[in-house]
Protein backbone atom coordinates (compact mmCIF):
# COMPACT_ATOMS: atom_id res chain seq x y z
CA UNK A 1 0.00 0.00 0.00
CA UNK A 2 1.35 3.43 -0.88
CA UNK A 3 2.07 5.97 1.87
CA UNK A 4 -0.84 8.22 0.84
CA UNK A 5 -3.23 5.25 0.83
CA UNK A 6 -1.96 4.16 4.24
CA UNK A 7 -2.37 7.67 5.65
CA UNK A 8 -5.87 8.05 4.25
CA UNK A 9 -6.72 4.58 5.49
CA UNK A 10 -5.66 5.64 8.97
CA UNK A 11 -7.74 8.79 8.78
CA UNK A 12 -10.74 6.82 7.56
CA UNK A 13 -10.30 4.24 10.32
CA UNK A 14 -10.27 7.04 12.90
CA UNK A 15 -13.46 8.49 11.46
CA UNK A 16 -15.03 5.04 11.73
CA UNK A 17 -13.72 4.59 15.30
CA UNK A 18 -11.72 1.54 14.22
CA UNK A 19 -8.95 2.39 16.64
CA UNK A 20 -6.59 -0.57 16.21
CA UNK A 21 -6.69 -0.29 12.42
CA UNK A 22 -6.18 3.48 12.69
CA UNK A 23 -3.19 3.08 14.98
CA UNK A 24 -1.62 0.50 12.67
CA UNK A 25 -2.16 2.50 9.49
CA UNK A 26 -1.10 5.85 10.93
CA UNK A 27 1.97 4.28 12.55
CA UNK A 28 2.91 2.72 9.21
CA UNK A 29 2.42 6.03 7.41
CA UNK A 30 4.52 7.78 10.08
CA UNK A 31 7.31 5.25 9.63
CA UNK A 32 7.43 6.06 5.91
CA UNK A 33 7.24 9.83 6.32
CA UNK A 34 6.79 11.72 9.61
CA UNK A 35 3.18 12.75 10.14
CA UNK A 36 2.17 16.37 10.49
CA UNK A 37 0.61 17.61 13.74
CA UNK A 38 -3.08 17.02 12.82
CA UNK A 39 -2.37 13.41 11.85
CA UNK A 40 -0.23 12.95 14.96
CA UNK A 41 -3.27 14.00 16.99
CA UNK A 42 -5.32 11.33 15.20
CA UNK A 43 -2.61 8.78 15.91
CA UNK A 44 -2.53 9.86 19.57
CA UNK A 45 -6.29 9.39 19.84
CA UNK A 46 -6.14 5.94 18.28
CA UNK A 47 -3.27 4.94 20.57
CA UNK A 48 -5.16 6.17 23.62
CA UNK A 49 -8.26 4.23 22.62
CA UNK A 50 -6.32 0.96 22.39
CA UNK A 51 -4.57 1.49 25.71
CA UNK A 52 -1.10 2.50 24.56
CA UNK A 53 -0.73 5.42 27.00
CA UNK A 54 3.01 5.95 26.59
CA UNK A 55 2.80 6.01 22.81
CA UNK A 56 -0.27 8.26 23.05
CA UNK A 57 1.71 10.84 25.03
CA UNK A 58 4.71 10.59 22.69
CA UNK A 59 2.50 11.28 19.66
CA UNK A 60 0.89 14.26 21.39
CA UNK A 61 4.34 15.59 22.32
CA UNK A 62 5.36 15.47 18.67
CA UNK A 63 2.11 17.19 17.65
CA UNK A 64 2.69 19.88 20.28
CA UNK A 65 6.19 20.59 19.00
CA UNK A 66 4.98 20.63 15.40
CA UNK A 67 2.25 23.14 16.18
CA UNK A 68 4.64 25.29 18.21
CA UNK A 69 7.15 25.33 15.34
CA UNK A 70 4.37 26.19 12.88
CA UNK A 71 3.29 29.19 14.96
CA UNK A 72 -0.01 27.66 16.10
CA UNK A 73 0.04 28.29 19.86
CA UNK A 74 -3.62 27.41 20.51
CA UNK A 75 -3.24 23.97 18.94
CA UNK A 76 0.10 23.52 20.73
CA UNK A 77 -1.63 24.47 23.99
CA UNK A 78 -4.37 21.90 23.40
CA UNK A 79 -1.83 19.11 22.99
CA UNK A 80 0.14 20.27 26.04
CA UNK A 81 -3.05 20.44 28.11
CA UNK A 82 -4.06 16.86 27.29
CA UNK A 83 -0.53 15.60 27.96
CA UNK A 84 -0.52 17.38 31.31
CA UNK A 85 -3.93 16.09 32.32
CA UNK A 86 -3.06 12.53 31.28
CA UNK A 87 0.17 12.64 33.30
CA UNK A 88 -1.60 14.18 36.28
CA UNK A 89 -4.28 11.50 36.23
CA UNK A 90 -1.53 8.89 36.05
CA UNK A 91 0.11 10.29 39.20
CA UNK A 92 2.98 12.06 37.46
CA UNK A 93 2.38 15.44 39.09
CA UNK A 94 5.74 17.00 38.23
CA UNK A 95 5.69 16.19 34.54
CA UNK A 96 1.97 16.91 34.34
CA UNK A 97 2.43 20.31 35.94
CA UNK A 98 5.22 21.11 33.53
CA UNK A 99 3.04 20.35 30.52
CA UNK A 100 0.14 22.35 31.95
CA UNK A 101 2.50 25.30 32.47
CA UNK A 102 3.62 24.92 28.86
CA UNK A 103 -0.03 24.98 27.76
CA UNK A 104 -0.58 28.16 29.76
CA UNK A 105 2.45 29.83 28.17
CA UNK A 106 1.19 28.89 24.70
CA UNK A 107 -2.19 30.45 25.47
CA UNK A 108 -0.52 33.59 26.76
CA UNK A 109 1.53 33.74 23.56
CA UNK A 110 -1.68 33.49 21.54
CA UNK A 111 -3.42 36.14 23.62
CA UNK A 112 -6.93 35.46 22.30
CA UNK A 113 -9.97 34.39 24.25
CA UNK A 114 -10.47 30.72 23.41
CA UNK A 115 -11.81 27.47 24.80
CA UNK A 116 -8.30 26.51 25.92
CA UNK A 117 -8.49 29.12 28.67
CA UNK A 118 -11.53 27.33 30.06
CA UNK A 119 -9.77 23.99 29.90
CA UNK A 120 -6.91 25.44 31.91
CA UNK A 121 -9.35 26.00 34.80
CA UNK A 122 -9.96 22.25 35.10
CA UNK A 123 -6.82 21.39 37.13
CA UNK A 124 -7.66 24.19 39.57
CA UNK A 125 -11.27 22.98 39.82
CA UNK A 126 -10.09 19.42 40.52
CA UNK A 127 -7.60 20.67 43.14
CA UNK A 128 -10.24 22.76 44.94
CA UNK A 129 -12.68 19.86 44.91
CA UNK A 130 -10.04 17.47 46.29
CA UNK A 131 -9.33 19.97 49.08
CA UNK A 132 -13.04 20.00 49.96
CA UNK A 133 -13.62 23.53 48.69
CA UNK A 134 -16.73 22.77 46.65
CA UNK A 135 -17.81 26.42 46.64
CA UNK A 136 -14.41 27.46 45.26
CA UNK A 137 -14.56 24.73 42.62
CA UNK A 138 -18.03 25.84 41.54
CA UNK A 139 -16.97 29.51 41.44
CA UNK A 140 -13.91 28.66 39.36
CA UNK A 141 -16.01 26.59 36.97
CA UNK A 142 -18.53 29.43 36.67
CA UNK A 143 -15.71 31.85 35.83
CA UNK A 144 -14.96 29.78 32.75
CA UNK A 145 -18.52 29.81 31.46
Image (cartoon, rainbow, N blue to C red):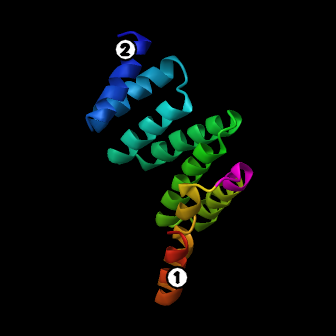
- Residue at horizontal 67%, vertical 54%? 107
Q: Is residue 17 visible?
A: yes
Please indicate whether residue 46 sits to the left or right of residue 140 in the image: left
Please indicate whether residue 85 sits to the left or right of residue 103 in the image: left
- Residue at horizontal 29%, vertical 30%? 13
Q: Examine the structure image and report whether residue 59 is included in the region drawn in magenta.
A: no
Q: Nearer the viewer, residue 111 or 100?
A: 111
Q: Which residue is mark 1?
A: 139
Point out residue 63 in the picture as x, y percentages from the top left corner: 57, 38
Point out residue 144 in the picture as x, y percentages from the top left corner: 53, 69
Instruction: Between label 1 and label 2, give the one nearer the viewer.
Output: 1
- Residue at horizontal 51%, vertical 39%? 59
Mark 1 vs 2, N-terminal side:
2
- Residue at horizontal 53%, vertical 62%? 119
Quadrant where the N terminus is found in the figure: top left
Q: Which residue is mark 2?
A: 5
Magenta part mainly helix, strand or loop? helix
Q: Look at the numbered disc 2 and give the secondary structure of its residue.
A: helix
State the separation of the CA atoms marked 1 and 2.
49 Å
Q: Are marks 1 and 2 in contact (CB under 8 Å)?
A: no
Instruction: Count residues near mark 2 (Cα–Cα under 10 Å), then give few for <14, some for 14-19, many for 20+.
Output: few
Q: Which residues are magenta?
A: 106-112
The quarter of the displayed image where residue 99 is located: bottom right
Q: Nearer the viewer, residue 28 or 137?
A: 137
Q: Look at the numbered disc 1 and give the secondary structure of its residue.
A: helix
The quarter of the displayed image where residue 27 is located: top left
Point out residue 55 in the picture as x, y percentages from the top left corner: 47, 42
Q: Is residue 132 visible?
A: no
Amino acid sequence: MEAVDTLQGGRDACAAHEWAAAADALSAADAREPLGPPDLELLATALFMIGRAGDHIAALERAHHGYAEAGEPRRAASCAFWIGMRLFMGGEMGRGGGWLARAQRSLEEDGSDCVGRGYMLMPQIFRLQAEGDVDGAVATAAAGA
